[in-house]
Image: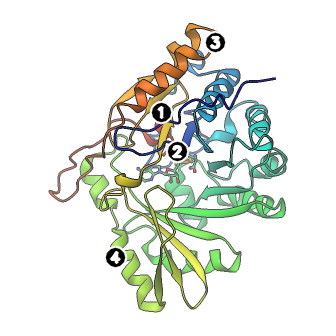
Amino acid sequence: MEHVSSGAAPLIDPFARAITYLRVSVTDRCDFRCVYCMSENMQFLPKKELLTLEELDRMCTTFIGLGVRKLRITGGEPLVRRDIMTFFQGMKRHLDAGVLDELTLTTNGSQLSRFAEPLVAAGVRRINISLDTLDEAKFAQITRWGRLKQVMDGIDAAQAAGLRVKINAVALKGFNEDELFTLQDWCASRDMDLTFIEVMPMGDLGNEDRIDQYWSLKDLRARLADRFTLTDLPLRTGGPARYVELEETGQKIGFITPLTHNFCESCNRVRLTCTGQLYMCLGQEDMADLRAPLRASEGNTVLEDAIRKAISLKPKGHDFDYSRQAVDGQMSRHMSHTGG
Ligand code: SAM
Ligand code: SF4
């Protein structure tokens, strides 16, 4: 019988935040090339750099033994990783054992026609699907390689399989501003929650491009308030999202504003890359390599020590700052690397 709940002390960082949420990027590859996320000719990691599925399982299992209660699988596109369902099926044992509360994923939706049912069978109940536009031509433009129809089929399959779907849309100036109400309406008609994400200074688009694309969620919110009565919801996830309810529809709308809000005080999460690097904060370069300690021995003591040491270095917050019109704290790594 596997040793999961070791009764070990939970992971508490230097600012008294309990780390209960692990986001895991299982691949840096993707079948899309969204312009704000990747360059057109991305160089991907050699396969041998990646944690194997067995290593990913061991890593997540160790975190769960240290008190992580929620796993979000992301990428790159998590569903393009070969045999990824084996990993999901493996994680189901922790849900069954009651040591994991939630297993979920963030996906571009392209592979859901195939995988919605197997995901449900593995214990997944809710998923986030990223979709910025309902216009076929604009979709092709923003994702470079994506086809809207395939994602729509994926969303249909997800809902038919009983998955609760939340749509995540990146707010992009001059791109989907005019679709604010179309998106909101469409989500309401399909009983899906909707969250808008402010674009972050990631990847390698020039700084000017980046600021050009920036559409403040404050503005977006004000436009919603022109048409609806907004009630702030106290709902807090420990993450960067804030929620409002539209009184007229009862719909919940989320806002992720990493650049204009300081949400760090309640941060309960860390991020693992597909090569086993642990990022303690999305906005800081600090990371700890967990692959070497994982591979150093078959027992997990070395790995657990490395995880505790990493958590003891979790910084207080991030340094993104647009206020001076220069992108201070600009991150050189891509979202597809840390998984967003
Ligand atoms: N491929 C999956 C997907 O698209 O949902 C999972 C990985 S993707 C990196 C996770 C989320 O990050 C997506 O919702 C995507 O829109 C968002 N994202 C990527 N680059 C971003 C950026 N520069 N600013 C804000 N959000 C970004
Ligand atoms: Fe792929 Fe998601 Fe990045 Fe788009 S946002 S390129 S779908 S990883």
Q: Position of residue 48 (x, y in %)?
A: 59, 15
Label 4 element class: helix
* Residue that label 1 marks: 42
At label 1, the amino acid type is Met
* Residue that label 2 marks: 33
* Residue that label 4 marks: 219
The first of marks 3 and 4 along the sequence is 4
Q: Nearer the viewer, residue 218 or 214?
A: 218
Q: Is mark 2 within 8 Å of ligand 2?
A: yes
At label 4, the amino acid type is Asp
The first of marks 1 and 2 along the sequence is 2
Q: Is mark 1 within 8 Å of ligand 2?
A: no
Q: Which mark is residue 299?
A: 3
At label 2, the amino acid type is Arg
**Residue at x-position 80% and y-position 42%:** 96
Q: Position of residue 118 (x, y in %)?
A: 83, 45
The first of marks 4 and 1 along the sequence is 1
Does residue 117 appear in this view?
yes
Q: Nearer the viewer, residue 129 or 179?
A: 129
Does residue 134 appear in this view?
no
